[in-house]
Image (cartoon, rainbow, N blue to C red):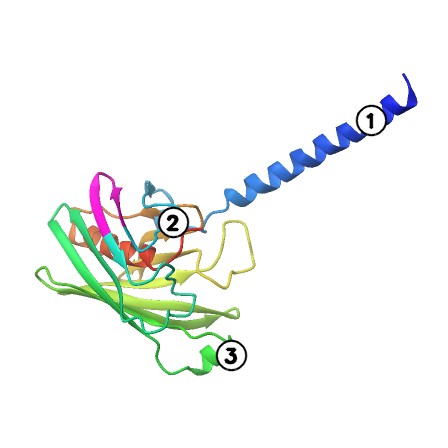
Amino acid sequence: MPKSTAIAMTLFALLAAGCATVREASRAMREERMAQPPSVAGVAEEKFGRPAWGRQGEFSLNGQRVHYERGAERLALFEPLPAKLQTALRFSWAGPAGESSTVCEAWTPETSANGRLTDSKPWVLSCRWGSGPAAMLQIGEGQMRRGKLSREGAYRRGELTVGLRSTHLYEGRAQPQTAAVGYEMLHQGAVVGSLDLSGPVPRLRRPDPATPLGRAVTEAALALALVSEPG
């Protein structure tokens, strides 16, 4: 075999191996997922939404229509609040209990010690559902954990309260991310739902949406997804 041909074949083999390595690395990155707590690890996952939210649109969550309008083209709890934005989000959900609509306001409070430490300006999202009994959601600056500033809050409807907290770990990784890779919903201290934002569209694990707890987790998850840019 001519020397030039052998060299060419060797270079081709090295190039092919390199491309395969890049493809494997890219695939691994695409498949990264939010680390799930054991309490919801076996719950079926539901994908929903769009690769890019934009200012308005519609999508289906398990056959249930969701229509939304956002106050900015880009809106994320871990990014600065767009200037002069107050009404951050409006959306309606045709759930098992009927049509559910909410309006969400947003504001940036005075910078806290944690905010100064992370050079961050966490803003507050506050939503209200008018259907009876009325429900409220509020989430903003949370705790400093391993150098990352979380977002925490709660959803309340009547006597039902669901805690909300951002999570920052991918499966199999020890180092947390600065921005959230998802959120957990808690009831009476246990995680009962999760919203995975690590992929191109959100993935939701929730109780039966026909139950009050499932409705609460769903409404909270929709609000949090719509103020988080898809991964």
Question: Where residue 137 appears, x then y in whole percent?
Answer: 24, 66
Quarter of the picture holding the N terminus: top right
Tag 1 near tag 2, CB within 8 Å: no
Q: Residue at x 36, y 42 (%)?
A: 42
| Dot 1 amino acid type | Ala
User: x and y percent of residue 140 in the render?
Assistant: 34, 71
Q: Residue at x 21, y 56 (%)?
A: 91
Question: Where 171 falls versus 190 (above or below)?
Answer: above
Instruction: Give the crowd class for mark 2: few <14, some 14-19, many >=20 residues within 10 Å.
Output: some
Q: Earlier in the sequence, mark 1 or mark 2?
A: 1
What number is the disc on residue 8?
1
Which type of secondary structure does the marked residue at label 3 adopt? helix
Residue type for callout 2: Ala
Q: Nearer the viewer, mark 3 or mark 1?
A: 1
Say which residue label 3 marks: 117
**Start-end of magenta stretch:** 57-67
Q: Earlier in the sequence, mark 3 or mark 1?
A: 1
Query: In the image, what residue occupies the spot 48% across and 80% down?
Result: 116
69 lies left or right of 150: left
Who comes first in sequence, dot 2 or dot 3? 2
Q: Which residue is mark 2?
A: 52
Answer few, some or many: residues within 10 Å of disc 1's Cα (few below 14, many 20 plus, some between 14 and 19).
Answer: few
Given contact means CB atoms under 8 Å apart, are the residues at marks 2 and 3 in contact?
no
Q: State the separation of the CA atoms marked 3 and 1.
A: 55 Å
